[in-house]
C-alpha cells in the first residue's frame, strides 16, 4: 500500500469534513452540523487500523493530530514508526524519521484530485456527498457519507459521535480497504499556534520535491 497516497486521501477527506457544514435533515444530522460548523481547531490522540479487502489487519498506528481550518493539519505518528505529516496551507510535508527523508508536494494539487480532497469548504458537503443518518442506540450518532462522484477514490465514510463528541471516522476506499480512526482526548476550539503547522527539515534530511 502506498502509505503517503493513502494517507493523503484520508487526511484530505477529514479536512473536508472539518471545513464544510452539514445539512440538518434530522436530529442526528443536526448534532453533526452543530459540532462542525462551530469548529475552528481540533486536537486529539488517535488509534488507526487499516483492514484490507480480505478482512486482514494490515496496519496499526498511534499518534496525535492537530487541525486548524482551513487547510492546515499535522499528524504525528509515534508507533510503530515515527512519521510526521504536515500541511501548512500550501504544501504537504511527509517526513519519515527512520529514512531521514521528507517528501514535499503542493497541497492544492493533491487535495483537489477528488471531491473527498477538497479543503476550502467553498462547496457545501451535501453537494459532494449523499448523507444518511444511521439507526443507533440512544446517545450515539452515526452519519454515512457517500460520494456523489464516481471519480472519488473514497467510496464511503462514516462519522461516529457519542454524547455529542466526535469519536470515530471509518473510511472505505475503492481498493476495498477500510481505515478506522478512533479519537481520544479530543479537544476543539482551543488555542493552537501556527508554528505547529510549520515543518523545518532536520539537518541532514533528504528533501524530495520543491519547497518553494
Image (cartoon, grey):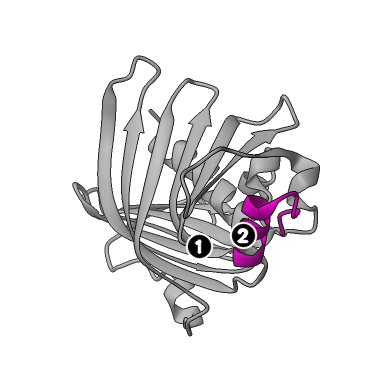
The local secondary structure at tag 1 comes to: loop
**Is 194 situated above or below 200?**
below
**In the image, residue 146 lies at what x, y percent?**
66, 33
Task: Name the quadrant containing residue 183.
Answer: bottom left
Number of numbered discs: 2
Return the residue at label 2. 31
Span shown in magenta = 21-35
Residue at 73 percent of width and 58 percent of height: 121
Q: Nearer the viewer, residue 53 or 200?
A: 53
The rendered magenta stretch, by its main secondary structure, is classed as helix
Q: Is residue 164 magenta?
A: no
**Left or right position of 118 against 209:** right
Q: Quadrant of the N terminus?
A: top left
Quick one: label 1, few (<14), some, or many (20+) residues within 10 Å? some
Residue at 43 percent of width and 26 percent of height: 177
**In the image, residue 79 lies at what x, y percent?**
20, 51
The local secondary structure at tag 2 comes to: helix
In the rendering, which numbered label is found on residue 164?
Answer: 1
**Left or right position of 4 against 60:** right
Q: Nearer the viewer, residue 60 or 84?
A: 60
Amino acid at each position: 500500500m502506498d502509505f503517503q497516497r493513502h494517507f493523503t486521501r484520508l487526511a484530505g477527506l477529514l479536512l473536508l469534513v472539518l471545513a464544510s457544514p452539514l445539512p440538518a435533515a434530522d436530529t442526528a444530522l443536526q448534532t453533526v452540523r452543530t459540532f462542525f460548523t462551530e469548529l475552528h481547531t481540533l486536537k486529539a490522540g488517535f488509534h488507526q487500523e487499516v483492514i484490507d479487502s480480505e478482512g486482514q489487519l494490515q496496519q496499526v498506528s498511534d499518534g496525535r493530530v492537530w487541525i486548524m481550518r482551513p487547510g492546515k493539519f499535522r499528524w504525528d505518528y509515534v508507533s510503530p514508526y515515527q512519521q510526521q505529516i504536515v500541511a501548512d496551507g500550501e504544501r504537504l510535508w511527509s517526513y519519515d524519521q527512520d529514512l531521514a527523508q521528507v517528501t514535499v508536494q503542493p497541497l492544492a494539487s493533491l487535495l483537489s484530485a477528488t471531491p473527498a480532497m477538497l479543503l476550502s469548504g467553498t462547496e457545501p458537503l451535501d453537494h459532494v456527498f449523499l448523507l444518511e443518518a444511521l439507526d443507533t442506540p440512544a446517545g450515539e450518532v452515526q452519519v454515512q457519507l457517500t460520494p456523489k462522484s464516481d471519480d472519488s477514490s473514497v467510496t464511503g465514510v462514516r462519522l461516529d459521535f457519542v454524547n455529542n463528541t466526535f469519536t470515530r471516522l471509518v473510511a472505505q476506499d475503492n481498493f476495498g480497504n477500510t481505515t478506522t480512526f478512533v479519537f481520544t482526548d479530543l479537544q476543539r476550539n482551543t488555542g493552537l499556534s501556527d508554528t505547529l503547522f510549520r515543518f523545518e527539515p532536520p539537518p541532514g534530511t533528504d528533501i524530495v520535491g520543491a519547497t518553494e
